[in-house]
Image (cartoon, rainbow, N blue to C red):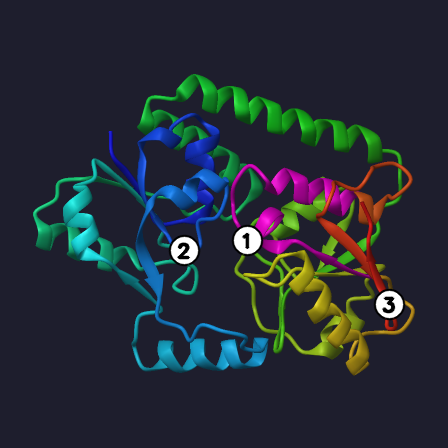
């Protein structure tokens, strides 16, 4: 079987369930596991590459969408060469990956009869279900089932560790300029961590908010989890937000590795839940290595 993955999360899942040897095409963002970098890149971005600020990225995305332009490109030549049997894509977010209509058009144009699997999880449970779905489509049902059992077991251990504790209010921000609330599966992650999500709703899309909305939500902790950023980038953005004085004073602010454990709906979301559980209950749950960092206006340092 020859598989093309047009989602970093799907690439991660495919390797995790034992189908990695069949993955022959990926996107420019597919960087985990490291073996994925050996696959041919079939999808790239049309956005300006380089050191853009969050506000510059947001402005370019809005302008391209308003003009009806694509944010991603699909290399039809690479698809023709690969002639895949299975293509994994999404129909959830135009900002996240190549649009499914473009995939269908390209395959039809090339006369390719590949099966197209669309993954559109909105909740944490649906993310786990998608692992089993890919297991079924790739003949790796047993490993996929074992992986889901393992991940649910980790969630159960977190739940046991925090079940008798108070549930602090946590605001997760998925963008900082302009600010966006958390959405999709992230509020579920907060709940699984033994906390209450604010400025975000379970199973709904992330939406733009205003900084006063964060203060009005009365959070006990604020988590900066910008889509597309690793921990070091999130720490830099969190420091900028703190320096701007737009957050309510006296509230702990954390930065997290969003790409690794928050915004890509794959197995590593459970590390994100563990990180949130440490933020909410530091004495009950240890911090996963390299996932979270507590911030201050003048200095920062990784916790774990």
Which is more N-terminal, label 3 or label 1?
A: 1
Q: Mark 1 points at which residue?
A: 184
**Which residue is situated farthest in the top direction here?**
142
Compared across the picture, whether 232 is left or right of 147 comes to right
Q: Magenta stretch: residue 264 in it? A: yes
- Mark 2 to mark 3 CA distance (whole Å): 37 Å
User: Are there few (<14), some (14-19), or many (20+) residues within 10 Å of tag 3?
Assistant: few
Q: Mark 2 points at which residue?
A: 92
The kind of secondary structure element at disc 1 is loop
User: Are there few (<14), some (14-19), or many (20+) residues within 10 Å of tag 1?
Assistant: many
- Mark 1 to mark 3 CA distance (whole Å): 31 Å
Provide the residue span drawn in magenta.
253-277
Q: Is residue 130 visible?
A: no
Q: Where is residue 51 in the image (x, y as percent from the top left)?
A: 54, 75
- Mark 1 to mark 2 CA distance (whole Å): 10 Å
Compared across the picture, whether 75 is left or right of 215 comes to left
**Quadrant placement of the C terminus:** top right
**Residue shown at the point (54%, 26%) measured from the top left:** 148
Q: Name the residue under label 3.
A: 299
**Residue shown at the point (85%, 59%) measured from the top left:** 220
Instruction: State the count of labels.
Output: 3
Labels 1 & 2 near each other (Cβ < 8 A)? yes
């Amino acid at each position: 079987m020859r598989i093309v993955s047009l989602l970093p999360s799907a690439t991660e899942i495919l390797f995790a369930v034992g189908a990695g040897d069949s993955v022959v095409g990926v996107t420019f963002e597919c960087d985990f596991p490291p073996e994925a970098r050996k696959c041919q890149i079939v999808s790239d971005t049309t956005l300006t590459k380089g050191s853009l600020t969050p506000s510059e990225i947001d402005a370019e995305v809005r302008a391209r969408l308003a003009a009806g332009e694509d944010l991603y490109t699909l290399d039809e030549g690479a698809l023709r060469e690969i002639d895949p049997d299975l293509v994994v894509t999404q129909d959830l977010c135009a900002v996240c990956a190549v649009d499914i209509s473009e995939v269908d058009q390209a395959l039809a144009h090339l006369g390719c009869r590949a099966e197209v699997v669309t993954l559109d999880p909105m909740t944490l449970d649906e993310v786990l279900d998608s692992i089993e779905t890919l297991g079924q489509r790739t003949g790796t049902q047993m490993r996929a089932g074992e992986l889901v059992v393992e991940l649910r077991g980790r969630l159960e251990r977190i739940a046991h560790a925090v079940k008798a504790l108070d549930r602090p209010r946590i605001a997760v921000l998925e963008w900082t300029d302009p600010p966006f609330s958390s959405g999709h599966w992230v509020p579920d992650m907060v709940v699984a961590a033994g906390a209450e999500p604010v400025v975000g709703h379970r199973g709904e899309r992330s939406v733009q908010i205003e900084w006063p909305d964060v203060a009005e939500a009365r959070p006990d902790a604020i988590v900066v989890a910008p889509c597309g950023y690793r921990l070091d980038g999130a720490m830099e953005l969190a420091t900028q937000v703190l320096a701007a004085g737009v957050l309510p004073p006296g509230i702990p602010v954390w930065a997290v590795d969003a790409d690794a454990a928050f915004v890509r709906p794959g197995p590593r979301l459970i590390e994100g839940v563990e990180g949130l559980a440490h933020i909410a209950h530091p004495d009950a749950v240890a911090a996963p290595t390299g996932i979270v960092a507590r911030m201050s206006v003048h200095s920062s340092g990784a916790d774990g």
